Amino acid sequence: MTPVTPTTPRAPFGRRRCTVGANRASGGYRVFSLLDREGPEPAAGRFYMLAAAAGWGDRSGRPQLPRAISVAETGPAADGIRLDFLVDDVGPGTGRLCELEPGEEVWLTGPLGNDFGEPAEVAGPGAAGAILVGGGVGVAPLALLRRRFAERGVPHRVLLGFRDEEHSGGLDLFCSAAGALCPEVRLASEDGHAGHRGYVTDLLGAMLAGDDAGSAVVYACGPPAMLEAVRALCADAVVPCRLALESPMACGYGACFGCAVPKPGGGYLRLCVDGPVLSGEQLTAVPEAELARA
Amino acid sequence: MLEGPQLCGIELAHPVLNGSGTYDAIAARRVFGDEILDDFPFAAFVSKTITPQPRTGNEPRRIWETPAGMLNSIGLPNKGLEGFLAEDLPQLAELPVPLIVSAMATTHEDFGRIVSALDAREEVAALELNVSCPNVHSGLIVGEDPRETLALLQALRPLTAKPLIVKLTPNVADPAAVAVAAEEGGADAVSLINTLKGSAIEPRSGEPALAAGHGGLSGPAVRPVALAQLRSVRAAIGLPIVGMGGIACGADAEEFLRAGATVVAVGTESFSDPKAGSRVARELGYGSERVAAAPVH
């Protein structure tokens, strides 16, 4: 599979202030909504740079930089579009985002990066369709991708994994209007509190061993170890995969060169402008990025 | 509206540039489109540093957030002189502002080759010499030693009539002595400060947070250091000065102008606000709105 192509529409130039519409618990995570009056509706996989307009680094000097967060859901709002973000409190930046109050303002730049795309393989005749694999707070971009696939009749299955109950959430983003978990979703948890006891990649391995795997495409987002397992499973099964990675990132638009990801032939990709969605062939291995406490 | 300043004879619409390596105008145009040409944030654009040969840059991890700032150890990724001339320069020439090209090399010969090649290109308005690198013959960091700085300028000055701006490193006891050497060697301006050498330890591993072990500190945390160095350099030389170091708003820029900077540059703040340059200029009184107090001339 070729590298995932850059996405249009482009982000408006510069950052803009958006108002927080809601902020609710979602399992152990938070989901907050912003009202974006200017930007285009984002495709699944794209991300925004976010910083609270007030209380950003005021006391301890951190957070200082905006945080790169994938959009989890979007939809029309009264005066623009609604953007939903799924966030886990792992440091001063995500912690501040988790405590946003409705009516507060957030600086936002985006949508940035590419998206998951939709290769012909997932919808063509005889296609097994898409397999979506999410881990932890990385389930976020797959929620929007799942809904898009469902709306367009693209066959898809969804595998979501979590460490334990405290480190799980976002499942409400994978529910029908009636509130029930969508039937195509299967769960795994390392502590066994929900679904298969073990890794979500156990489920993927079994699925790829099935007869129909050869005509599927895997879309994944989650912690580095999970993504690396997905990449290796797909490489062994000769199944194309698209992996949404995370990286330390100061700017999100190619300026800081902080989000370097090694290329197989030497040199580096900039995850913000060359990704965040990479095809398996663009990586020798998913780097074990040190991401926590951001 | 205020009239823009001059830097080494280059007319500028306002006094705000970018710090080298903090804005990739080519990538930004890919991300935001041609809107950046209509509303370009800087009065002149300073390129990322180019070197004689291509560089891939340092192994990650490359950046680390710190209180009111960040550390970076990017390692000057660039396409090398030939790649820059063939691929990047034509695109940078489409920007609506004068182009200043930052360059670095580890021998006088290599540095001279870059300077001569850039001298031949009319798209290039001026050169910034990144001297925060070793001279491979002496092993000394050029910008940390007045004699090395003087010798480099004496080697490069005859090669071009274009303005030469020397980017001073703050990691010395007496930056003014290096500035004096740059002036004596025929530099047209100096810029300061580059990033301050710094390090952080990743608490869980106990290892340095950056793969390179240390990096350069930037952001609001360095602003008082930058201002002190600017004042001492201003007292020592008569050349124009590009002042920078943690400028995030017009009031910050005002401090640098009052301390003796001819123009200022914005770096880390552009990571949070892609249009920080034009915002700072506006807050200084350039452009449509007048927000801050009058700048000093």
Image: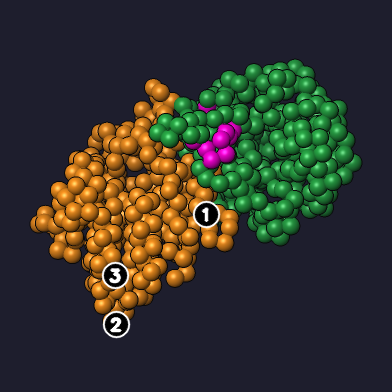
Tell us which disc is closer to us: 1 or 2: 1
Splitting the image into 4 quarters, where does residue B239 fall? top right
Which residue is labeled 3 in the image?
Answer: A208
Q: In front here: A30 or B105?
A: B105
| Chain identifier matching the orange colour in the rendered picture | A
Tell us which disc is closer to us: 2 or 3: 3
Residue type at mark 2 is Pro
Which residue is labeled 2 in the image?
Answer: A125
**Dot 2 lies on which element?**
loop
Q: How far apart are marks 3 and 1 (CA)?
A: 27 Å
**Is residue B282 visible to the viewer in this orientation of the structure?**
no
Quadrant of the rendering where the C terminus of chain B is positioned: top right
Question: On the rendered structure, is A169 left or right of B206?
Answer: left
Mark with earlier residue (3, 1): 3
Query: Does residue B42 show up magenta in the picture?
Result: no
**Dot 3 lies on which element?**
helix
Which residue is labeled 1 in the image?
Answer: A262
Q: Mark 2 lies on which chain?
A: A
On the same chain: label 3 and label 1?
A: yes
Magenta region: B209-220
Q: Which residue is drawn at 81% across and 47% down?
A: B110
Residue B267's spot in the image, x, y percent? 57, 36
